[in-house]
């Protein structure tokens, strides 16, 4: 990862609503969540929600899939883990024993569902 991508990703979550959206979708798991449900749970109007989802998607932190008439949004765990790794790559003067293991593991079977 380079500085430019890290800045784009950090800027995309440096806003209260977008951080809330991203955290909710991380909790939702690899199946994601319909946009309408995200808006309902976070009490964000549809027009505002679509703007925030677009910004997070543009930064590579979310992906989406159409399922019937619903659009499901899914957290990009690889991008999240890449950003965390980039932020902590020189942690503790290179001594990994003092750094927490923060990577989120995703079960490959879950990805196929």
Image: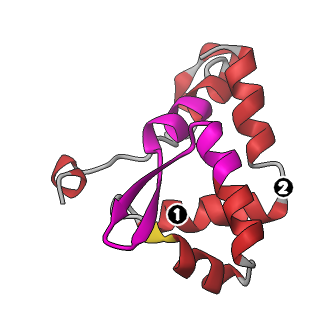
Task: Name the residue at the right extreme.
Answer: 15
> Residue 94, image x and y in percent?
62, 14
Q: Considering depth in this image, is 59 or 24 the residue closer to the camera? A: 59
Identify the colour scheme used. Answer: secondary structure
Q: Considering depth in this image, is 93 or 82 the residue closer to the camera? A: 82
**Does residue 82 appear left or right of residue 30 in this picture?**
right
Q: Which residues are magenta?
A: 54-83
Residue at numbered disc 2: 15
Badge 2 or badge 1: first in the primary sequence? 2
- Name the element at disc 1: helix
- Name the element at disc 2: loop
Q: Is residue 86 above or below residue 74?
A: above
Residue at numbered disc 1: 25
Label 2 environment density (alpha carbons within 10 Å; few <14, some 14–19, many ≥20): few
Q: Residue at x 60, y 35 (%)?
A: 84
> Residue 1, image x and y in percent?
59, 17
Q: Quadrant of residue 24?
A: bottom right
Find out whether residue 81 is within the magenta segment. Answer: yes
Quote the CA–CA distance across marks 2 and 1: 15 Å
Q: Considering depth in this image, is 84 or 25 the residue closer to the camera? A: 25
Q: Residue at x 62, y 84 (%)?
A: 41
Task: Name the residue at the front extreme.
Answer: 69
Find out whether residue 75 is within the magenta segment. Answer: yes
């Amino acid at each position: 990862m380079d500085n430019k991508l890290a800045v784009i990703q950090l800027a995309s979550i440096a806003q209260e609503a977008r951080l809330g959206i991203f955290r909710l979708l991380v909790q939702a798991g690899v199946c994601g969540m319909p946009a309408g449900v995200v808006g309902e749970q976070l009490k964000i109007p549809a027009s505002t929600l679509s703007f925030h989802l677009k910004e997070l998607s543009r930064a590579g932190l979310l992906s989406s899939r159409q399922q019937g008439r619903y659009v499901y949004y899914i957290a990009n765990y690889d991008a999240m883990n890449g950003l965390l790794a980039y932020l902590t790559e020189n942690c503790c003067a290179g001594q990994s024993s003092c750094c927490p293991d923060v990577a989120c593991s995703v079960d490959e079977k879950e990805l196929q569902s």
